[in-house]
């Protein structure tokens, strides 16, 4: 058994989960890994806060310098949120020759190149399994397990808060606000859920997955992001009627003209495996040219699942395995940019809900306009509201160019019979 | 870029898949792994067979000695079936100081201790991702990704042939024989499917997963194995009526008195994620104390999926990462035996289909007998066949001791009103 010194930077939820596993299952981890992990130091913004957790004999303070200058600490478990102070702290540790394991997806998505350059310069490892889909070893599977594959596509349900909200809206008929409130009560959603529900968190994780899948630079700002805030009970009901569920998907898909890369609420056909991922669960679906479709489902967040991922990185670093692996990977410090597909050139199935006057010729005008822009209709559903003489026409299309679809919608929204802007959603389909 | 010499032992389906990836995606693999893999030698039983595949400049012969004596070969891709010659060949390569990657599950399940002792003695690696669930990186996830977890249970749909047959029987109403015939036409089943349909292949994979999950010796012969040969269209229909699907599951489950370890056709509730795994797909569901339930679904066999797994092991070995990892793992050469649970002590849900005379008091006698043995009934379904004055009574029980259930069945089968032996199946349930 070999001793290995570690430090914990940030004692919040995940930090607490790490302490739980080390204190309760440390023996188990040692037997499996061959290492006795000694927690020498904890640095946290509020060292004096009363905690019901033992600090395992670690020295406790609030200054990053204490961590940086502690020669016993070989690897820092960096459990700090945000992208400013968190970045400075990570860099300080790497420059001090310490390996870093982080769960901070925003930090990686927005400052990847700088961070990995510092790591390379200082011959240190920066690991991040916990940054994507918490307890699911998705980075490991994609990076190592599927290394012999040309990755065609990566699709993910990467935010448990959104998936919980959408599941509750569908299964219990809750409004968006009620479902969000419930997610907050259960601790699935932050007090300020903005970054979750607006799709930013999903995009951060997608950027990391895409880096690894496509072995090049992904500029986070290039990702088209839609959140779920605008999804209504009506949308959910429509989806159900059309044999689908609405999921917030992060999608990276290799197409001829470039990489399709976006985050958007998407109609997932009810029979598709991603439609079955409920509540706060996450899922990552990777399509490799050799392995075929590979689905992983599990807990995407929470103290213990995230800590499980952090400690798997720690073992990989301590054993030297991670260094052997990461040293080889171009995407850690590549300068190659992955060419992205323009949204107009995306080929996707679409859903449109047209809010129109109930009068003759409307359905014909809609279907004619769609065919005028080469859009094939998969199914149509019309509902008439006699009392105010209005109707909704729902259309699901075969895969078509997003640009064409948007032009058709624009034209239809210009017709006199259109009483409200058309509601549109993407629809997932499996390429032939 | 670093050169790395490899040899291919056995040029069958998987060997062909490996050649396909190396010849078509070799550049991709090099960029990702940092290695140029040079195939120096192929040894196969029939080197003269006409093949439509290029041998990539490798020397081709039929003698294992040629491989063993080829100093350029650092790692041998061991794609040989069986457990006799295949074992001698693997040992010869390991003793020659060559690392070995194998896809042979039977070999590992039945000769694990001997093989890993040879590997340890010779400071060589023996890797086997491809031996379990083909294209799914299940070994990697369990061994490394979930290393910080105490594993509560491992459940798997581990044989694509059986899953394809059961799916066809359910979805298209085929008989067992017709479904099997179709699986053979499609190449999902061997000409002699015995080891697939009788559960042996699933048990081989379960033995390997259990070794890693529970970090100790698993004696293959201790695994209770039932196959799917006896499953009838009637059983499938009954399952459907009871809101379940029949899946051949390999189950390892940590219980108080020991490890539950068996392979059996099992009623899986329709809403459970494993019930959704169709056709020839495999699935591995691992329950970790920290990460929670982790599901992986993908292609369990076939040339390219299996080759994908083999090459991921190769990269791990070439980089030195695998050695760093495997060196630490007790289960590679542990002498600790994992205590198993006696079948009678298993606590499981059960299904019984009683074939009885249609006369007063029968249902009462059945239900009384079950309660006499402390078995709680979850649901009952009776069907009467007026013409021959017979009835079937189907019962699904809450979890109870298997021993009690079997005693109750024995007693019921002794009653005069029982006209045919009772059909029984296990039923999966999630522990509270």
Image: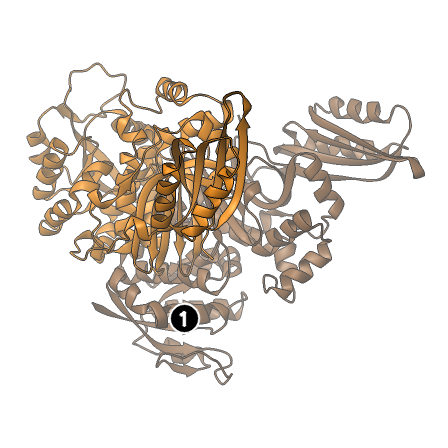
Chain colours: A brown, B orange
| Image position, residue B165 (x, y; %) | 40, 26
Res. A337 visible in picture: no
Which residue: 21% across, 14% down?
B50
Residue annotated with mark 1:
A20
| Image position, residue A398 (x, y; %) | 65, 27
Near-viewer residue (A408 or B14): B14
Which residue: 52% across, 52% down?
A205
Near-viewer residue (B412 or B100): B412
Q: Residue furthest top?
A: B50
Which residue: 54% across, 31% down?
B383
Please rate how many residues cluster around mark 1, counting C-alpha atoms within 10 Å: few if below 14, some from 14 to 19, many from 20.
some
Residue B307 falls in which quadrant of the image? top left
| Image position, residue B214 (x, y; %) | 28, 55
Which residue: 41% across, 21% down?
B179
Q: Is residue A37 above or below residue B200?
A: below
Q: Is residue B292 above or below residue B103?
A: below
Residue B302 falls in which quadrant of the image? top left
Quadrant where the N terminus of chain B is found in the figure: top left
| Image position, residue A370 (x, y; %) | 75, 26
Residue B432 located left or right of residue A278: left
Q: Is residue B168 above or below residue A166?
A: above
Near-viewer residue (A400 or B287): B287
Res. B69 visible in picture: yes
Q: Residue furthest bottom?
A: A48
Residue B401 located left or right of residue A282: left
Near-viewer residue (A309 or A280): A280
Chain containing mark 1: A
């Amino acid at each position: 058994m070999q001793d290995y010194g570690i430090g914990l930077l940030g004692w919040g939820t995940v930090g607490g989960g790490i302490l739980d596993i080390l204190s309760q299952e440390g023996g188990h981890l040692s037997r499996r890994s061959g290492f006795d992990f000694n927690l020498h130091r904890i640095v946290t913004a509020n060292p004096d806060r009363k905690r019901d957790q033992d600090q395992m004999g670690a020295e406790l303070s609030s200054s990053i310098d204490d961590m940086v200058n502690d020669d016993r600490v070989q690897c820092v478990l960096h459990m700090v949120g945000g992208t400013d102070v968190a970045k400075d702290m990570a860099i300080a540790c790497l420059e001090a020759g310490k390996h870093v394991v982080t769960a901070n997806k925003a930090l990686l998505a927005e400052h990847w190149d700088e961070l990995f350059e510092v790591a390379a310069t200082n011959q240190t490892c920066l690991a991040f399994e916990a940054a994507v889909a918490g307890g699911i070893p998705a980075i490991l599977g994609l990076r190592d397990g599927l290394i012999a594959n040309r990755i065609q596509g990566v699709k993910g349900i990467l935010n448990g808060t959104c998936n919980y909200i959408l599941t509750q809206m569908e299964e219990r008929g809750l409004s968006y606000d009620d479902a969000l409130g419930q997610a907050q009560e259960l601790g699935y959603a932050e007090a300020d859920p903005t970054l979750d529900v607006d799709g930013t968190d999903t995009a951060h994780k997608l950027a990391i997955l895409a880096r690894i899948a496509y072995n090049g630079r992904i500029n986070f700002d290039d990702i088209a992001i839609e959140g779920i805030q605008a999804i209504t009970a009506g949308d959910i009901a429509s989806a159900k009627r059309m044999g689908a569920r609405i999921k917030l998907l992060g999608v990276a898909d290799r197409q001829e003209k470039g990489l399709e890369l976006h985050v958007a609420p998407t109609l997932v056909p009810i029979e598709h495996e991603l439609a079955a991922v409920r509540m706060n669960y996450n899922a990552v679906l990777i399509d490799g040219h050799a392995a075929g479709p590979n689905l992983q489902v599990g807990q995407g967040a929470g103290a213990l699942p995230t800590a499980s991922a952090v400690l798997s990185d720690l073992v990989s670093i301590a054993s030297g395995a991670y260094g052997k692996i990461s040293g080889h990977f171009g995407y850690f410090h590549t300068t190659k940019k992955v060419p992205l597909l323009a949204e107009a050139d995306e080929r996707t199935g679409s859903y449109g809900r047209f809010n129109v006057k109930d009068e003759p010729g409307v359905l014909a005008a809609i279907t004619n306009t769609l065919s005028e822009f080469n859009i094939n209709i998969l199914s149509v559903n019309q509902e008439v509201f006699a009392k105010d003489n209005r109707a909704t026409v729902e259309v699901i299309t075969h895969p078509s160019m997003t640009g064409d679809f948007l032009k058709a919608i624009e034209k239809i929204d210009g017709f006199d019979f259109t009483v409200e802007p058309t509601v549109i959603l993407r629809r997932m389909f499996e390429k032939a």
